[in-house]
Amino acid sequence: MLAPSAANEVVSGVLRDVAKREALVSFQDIKARSRAMAPTRDARAALLRNGCSVIAEIKLNSPVYGPTGVERRDIADVARAIEEGGAHLIACQTERLRFDGSLNDMAEARDAVELPMVCRDVIVDPYQIHEARCYGADAVPLQVGILEQARLCALLDRAESLGMVVMAEVRTPEEADRALAAGASVVAVNSWTFDTNDLQRGAFAEIVPGLPSEVIKISLGGVRGVRDLIDAASCGADAVLAAEAIMSGEDIFAATRKLAAAGQHPSCPSRR
């Protein structure tokens, strides 16, 4: 299933966690529950707002920066502050192994707001697709570099059959080509390497010229403030995903508002 990668240790841990959850709730049960959920919120429309949309990521911990200062008990309040600050989507880090995340965190955030919700996790198994929908995901990432092409195509089709938007996460031009071949219409260029957590600041500018104009383009990683958002928009970003720029400060509302206002300012580059 998996392409050769130093990330296999992480993926193996994810699969062990999935097996434990599936022992409690069968695949057939989780699939039936996911298909009975209310319709998804429109993540695609949120990504195509004028200017450069902001996806604010909620996370409690980071393998690079350490704890963010956000407490699990405060997740609903954090989500409301992000929404009031003008973000267009909320991403919630649900990966347990490296980020201390939880699907329950995402469900709590989604219940508190009206914004579409992105489940940020290492998704490699069909069970996780249905599980994410059950916990309120409106969009999910698929990391191209750790999936063989057949599995990438199958997971993308399964997520879209549930009404979710798929963000194909890529780190190289070759991965971007594979995402397009799989039928991805949303490509997120992740500037963080998966295995070593190094920041490659030129990744978005390198990859975007090879993407068709109709593809929705997201800059993911390294957004520290307004300047980074403007730079990404200048290179063709329809949206940026910001985590530390929002989570690391004491005023989440103010940090979100600053980024969102910059992305919607008439001077911000836009495809429209």
Image (tube, rainbow, N blue to C red):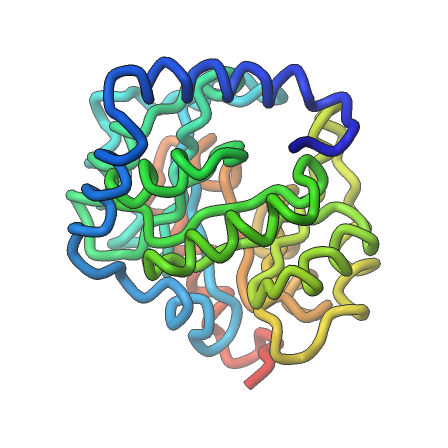
Where residue 54 sits: x, y (%)?
A: 46, 58
When the figure is inspected, residue 175 is found, relative to residue 26, above or below; the finding is: below
Q: Is residue 29 left or right of residue 223?
A: left
Identity of the residue drawn at 27% across and 56% down: 115
Identity of the residue drawn at 30% across and 45% down: 133
Where residue 188 sits: x, y (%)?
A: 61, 54
Q: Is residue 98 left or right of residue 94?
A: right
Q: How many marks?
A: 0
When the figure is inspected, residue 212 is found, relative to residue 246, above or below; the finding is: below
In the rendered image, the residue lying farthest to the bottom is 272
Q: Is residue 38 left or right of residue 188?
A: left
Identity of the residue drawn at 75% across and 65% down: 208
When the figure is inspected, residue 270 is found, relative to residue 16, above or below; the finding is: below
Quadrant containing the N terminus in the rendered view: top right
Q: Quadrant of residue 161?
A: bottom left
When the figure is inspected, residue 236 is found, relative to residue 98, above or below; the finding is: below
Identity of the residue drawn at 40% across and 35% down: 128
Pick the residue in front: 160 or 88. Answer: 160
Where residue 207 sits: x, y (%)?
A: 79, 59
In the rendered image, the residue lying farthest to the front is 28
Q: Quadrant of residue 59?
A: top left
Pick the residue in front: 254 or 12. Answer: 12
Pick the residue in front: 138 or 181. Answer: 181
Quadrant containing the C terminus in the rendered view: bottom right
Where residue 64 sits: x, y (%)?
A: 63, 21
